[in-house]
Image (spheres, rainbow, N blue to C red):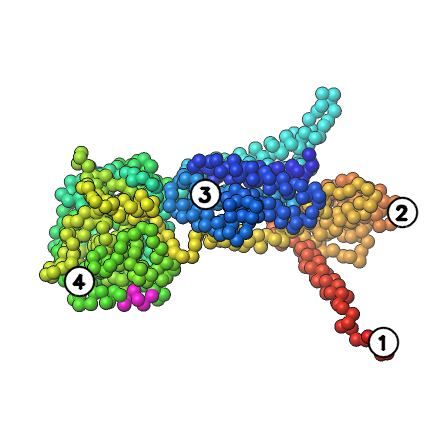
């Protein structure tokens, strides 16, 4: 088996091992068998074209074309020409599948079902990564950079997975990459084998060096993997990364400080809730007299940039024994103490703790932190709600309409922060708010009119299968189309309230659940909800309910005006109704038909999901852009490594091959010295140039002998009538390189590696190519453009 064949097989195996990290994301895992089969065909095409041989770009193009035809045969054979040739219909079908796959990714929790769209993403991604790895490692003979696409594949899987066995998939992916490096470096590892273990002996007692490289490579791989897994355990932990699961590292230290960043808290909630069945999220028991008003609040979103609502970056601290009195709540407002014991389901892993608002205290085990302004509790160090039971004491605040209507102006700092709106918000939002609330004499009256506008008399319809638009026009589109679900209603009302100088934010959590026969309350998937909270001085943050058919209308929003259009204030959420209904409820239809739930999408997905297609292409473009940005500064290093590998690599054994190989090795020797600051002098003979390199590089005797040995080979090649091949020249250059590295500072070594001086030869070669191209173009001009000589007949 040739070296190229072994490299191709190793590249395919490394790709498949890295793609195993995707296995926990989707069920069943049958897609991997299809990916193995298609990747094997793609690899076989590459092996065949390199044996022809074709030019490198043609080899890559042939593999890409075959991969496209294989995907067409697998996913779009009915839309293709002859079943394998993709046409416009096939590409449109691919776009539809990618759109459906992106929707499924955002809809389902992990593991997601293996839909056709997700299957196309997985198999197509494996083929693309496999082609990139094989192109770098085999076609262009540089295995080290092939780790970048493998890292991209593993990073996508690790970023989506929330399991605790990520290290297993890293170990598998790393083993594949090391196997690829081992295959490429067998010749170099043969030199390492004598040092580490010596060559094994044959039964006759003779040394045999053929097995030592492989055994030594395995030993080195095992040692490297062990170091990669063991050493990080002894280093300080670094939490809070983008790929950290379940909100790990939201704070620092042991409870004395830290911050919580503005990461969308609904992402993990969305993944847990987006399933096809109405599963129970949690069960609770409470001493509250009226459970129809018992909302479980997770977190508040108070940072609005015109497109999305998200939580601001806040300071967090250890959970206090007694929470302070909520901001703005005065002693004259009637309240009652409520105690609620909540048991979360074993499958519900949310790092924000659902609690009635405002909480007074919480009794819970584990690693939890407290954010004072929002009065929220968040898990620390991978702490989630999975299977936990906790008790929350809270206040049932019961303000009157008069107290809200006569509320004084809020503090200036609070008002500035929670009424801030971006300049890009369409003017129609504020205009609609003014028109709807015309005639109201207080902020409370304006808030009630806004609630009535959305929930009762504005003509809005509750619909989870709606596309409101994208970007900063999302709220304007929603006000025009008048269709949406709770995320849209709450976002729009909060933005409109801010335009009226009413401090507002959005709360997310669960609407009141369904009472059970044993006195408990079951909170299910259909109870997931979002609602606006408006601030009134003397009362504090106050809940409103603009979403029709969801939740319960607060009693304090009942208007004293005769003929009010407000419905019965005790109306329960349809999802919590226990009586029969002639028509399915909105919440039932949202599960059964659209498989989307109120507040199960992130705020970004809710307001940004529009007519511009899926987010998967944008994610892919960002990933490719990141790889390109990473490759640009590494280009000189990669090109230099490639050049060195070609010059010192395998060569022909005929007399015609002796001179090119020897001169290439000499050029590599002088360029290596150049990289370490010894500029070449083309005017000197090889012997004098060698002495200069030894003198300026302060080389040791073995390295100096290697330099002179290469110079002698060059002189023999240039001047001898019949040059003889000299063995070991490539190893001489590597010995010189190693000695130069040991003689200089680490900064010089880094400079020689990342920004080698000899890479300027690439620029010179491009200039020569451009000059030659212009000369060839000038020589190929038609003769009729040239002026005729006198007397010559045309």
Q: Which mark is residue 445?
A: 4
Q: Pointer 3: residues within 10 angstroms few (<14), some, or many (20+)?
A: some
Image quarter where the C terminus lies is bottom right
Q: Can you tell which of label 4 and label 3 is closer to the viewer?
A: 3
Q: Can you tell which of label 1 and label 4 is closer to the viewer?
A: 1
Name the N-terminal-most of marks 1 and 4.
4
Q: Which residue is mark 3?
A: 116
Q: CA distance from mark 3 to mark 2?
A: 69 Å
Q: CA distance from mark 2 to mark 4?
A: 105 Å
Q: Nearer the viewer, residue 558 or 49?
A: 49
The residue located at (38%, 43%) in the rendering is 108
Q: Which residue is mark 2?
A: 721
Q: CA distance from mark 3 to mark 1?
A: 73 Å
Asked if residue 498 lies left or right of residue 715, the reply is left
Q: Is residue 673 above or below residue 196?
A: below
Farthest bottom residue in view = 790
Image position, residue 414 (x, y; %): 26, 60
Residue 481 in view (yes/no): yes
Q: Are marks 3 and 1 in contact (CB under 8 Å)?
A: no
Image quarter where the N terminus lies is top right
Q: Can you tell which of label 1 and label 2 is closer to the viewer?
A: 1
Name the N-terminal-most of marks 4 and 3.
3
Residues in magenta? 426-431
Q: Secondary structure at mark 1?
A: loop
Name the N-terminal-most of marks 3 and 2.
3
Asked if residue 389 lies left or right of residue 32, the reply is left
Q: Can you tell which of label 2 and label 4 is closer to the viewer?
A: 4
Q: Which mark is residue 792?
A: 1
The residue located at (57%, 52%) in the rendering is 631
Q: Nearer the viewer, residue 7 or 298?
A: 7
Q: Is residue 431 above or below residue 620?
A: below
Image position, residue 332 (x, y; %): 12, 55
């Amino acid at each position: 088996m040739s070296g190229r064949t072994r490299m191709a097989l190793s590249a395919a195996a490394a790709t498949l091992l890295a793609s195993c990290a995707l296995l926990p994301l989707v069920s069943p895992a049958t897609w991997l068998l299809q990916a193995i089969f298609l990747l094997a065909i793609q690899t076989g095409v590459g092996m065949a074209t390199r044996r022809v041989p074709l030019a490198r770009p043609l080899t890559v193009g042939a593999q890409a074309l075959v991969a496209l035809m294989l995907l067409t045969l697998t996913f779009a054979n009915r839309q293709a020409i002859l079943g394998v040739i993709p046409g416009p219909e096939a590409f449109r079908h691919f776009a539809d599948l990618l759109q459906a796959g992106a929707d499924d990714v955002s809809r389902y929790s992990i593991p997601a079902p293996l839909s056709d769209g997700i299957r196309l993403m997985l198999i197509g991604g494996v083929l693309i990564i496999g082609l990139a790895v094989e192109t770098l490692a085999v076609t262009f003979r540089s295995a080290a950079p092939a780790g970048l696409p493998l890292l991209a594949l593993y990073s996508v899987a690790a970023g989506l997975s929330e399991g605790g066995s990520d290290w297993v998939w890293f170990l598998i992916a790393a083993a594949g990459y090391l196997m690829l490096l081992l295959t490429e470096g067998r010749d170099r590892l043969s030199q390492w084998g004598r040092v580490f273990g010596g060559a094994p002996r044959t039964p006759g007692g003779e040394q045999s060096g053929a097995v030592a490289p492989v055994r030594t490579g395995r030993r080195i791989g095992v040692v490297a993997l062990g170091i990669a897994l063991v050493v990080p355990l002894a280093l300080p932990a670094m939490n809070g990364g983008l790929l950290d699961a379940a909100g790990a590292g939201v704070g620092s230290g042991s409870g004395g400080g830290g911050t919580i960043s503005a990461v969308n808290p609904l992402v993990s909630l969305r993944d847990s809730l987006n399933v096809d069945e109405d599963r129970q999220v949690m069960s609770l028991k409470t001493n509250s007299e009226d459970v129809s008003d018992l909302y479980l609040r997770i977190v508040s979103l108070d940072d609005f940039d015109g497109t999305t609502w998200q939580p601001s970056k806040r300071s967090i601290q250890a959970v206090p024994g007694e929470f302070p009195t909520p901001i703005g709540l005065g002693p004259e407002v009637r309240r009652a103490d409520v105690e609620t014991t909540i048991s979360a389901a074993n499958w519900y892993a949310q790092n924000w703790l659902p609690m009635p608002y405002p909480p007074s205290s919480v009794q819970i085990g584990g690693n939890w932190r407290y954010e004072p302004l929002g009065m929220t509790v968040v898990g620390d160090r991978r702490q989630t709600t999975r299977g936990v039971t906790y008790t929350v004491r809270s206040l049932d605040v019961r303000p009157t309409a008069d107290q809200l209507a006569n509320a004084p102006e809020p503090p200036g700092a609070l008002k500035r922060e929670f009424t801030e709106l971006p300049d890009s918000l369409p003017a129609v939002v504020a205009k609609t708010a003014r028109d709807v609330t015309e005639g109201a004499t207080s902020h409370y009256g304006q808030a009630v009119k806004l609630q009535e506008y959305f929930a009762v008399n504005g003509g809005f319809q509750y619909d989870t299968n709606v596309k409101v638009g994208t970007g900063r026009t999302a709220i304007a589109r929603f006000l025009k189309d008048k269709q949406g679900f709770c995320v849209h209603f709450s976002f729009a009302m909060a933005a409109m309230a801010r335009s009226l100088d009413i401090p507002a934010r959005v709360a997310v959590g669960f609407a009141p659940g369904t009472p059970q026969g044993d006195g408990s309350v079951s909170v299910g998937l259909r109870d997931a909800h979002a609602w606006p909270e408006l601030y009134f001085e003397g009362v504090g943050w106050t809940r409103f309910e603009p979403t029709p058919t969801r939740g319960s209308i607060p009693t304090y929003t009942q208007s004293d005006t005769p003929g009010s259009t407000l419905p019965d204030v005790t109306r329960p959420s349809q999802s919590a109704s226990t009586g029969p209904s002639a028509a399915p409820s909105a919440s039932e239809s949202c599960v059964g038909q659209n498989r989307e739930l109120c507040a199960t999408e992130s705020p970004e997905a809710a307001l940004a999901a529009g007519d511009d297609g899926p987010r998967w292409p944008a994610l892919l473009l960002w990933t490719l852009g990141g790889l390109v940005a990473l490759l640009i500064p590494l280009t000189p290093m990669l090109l230099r490594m490639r050049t060195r590998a070609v010059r010192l690599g395998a060569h022909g054994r005929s007399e015609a091959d002796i001179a090119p190989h020897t001169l290439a090795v000499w050029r590599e020797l002088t360029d290596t010295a150049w990289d370490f600051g010894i500029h070449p002098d083309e005017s000197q003979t090889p012997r004098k140039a060698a002495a200069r390199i030894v003198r300026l590089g302060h080389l040791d005797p073995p390295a100096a002998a290697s330099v002179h040995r290469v110079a002698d080979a060059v002189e023999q090649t240039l001047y001898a009538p019949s040059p003889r091949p000299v063995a070991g020249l490539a190893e001489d250059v590597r010995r010189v390189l190693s000695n130069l590295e040991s003689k200089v500072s680490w900064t010089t070594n880094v400079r020689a590696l990342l920004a080698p001086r000899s890479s300027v030869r690439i620029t010179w070669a491009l200039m020569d190519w451009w000059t030659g191209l212009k000369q060839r173009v000038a020589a190929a001009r038609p003769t009729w453009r040239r002026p005729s000589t006198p007397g010559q007949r045309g």
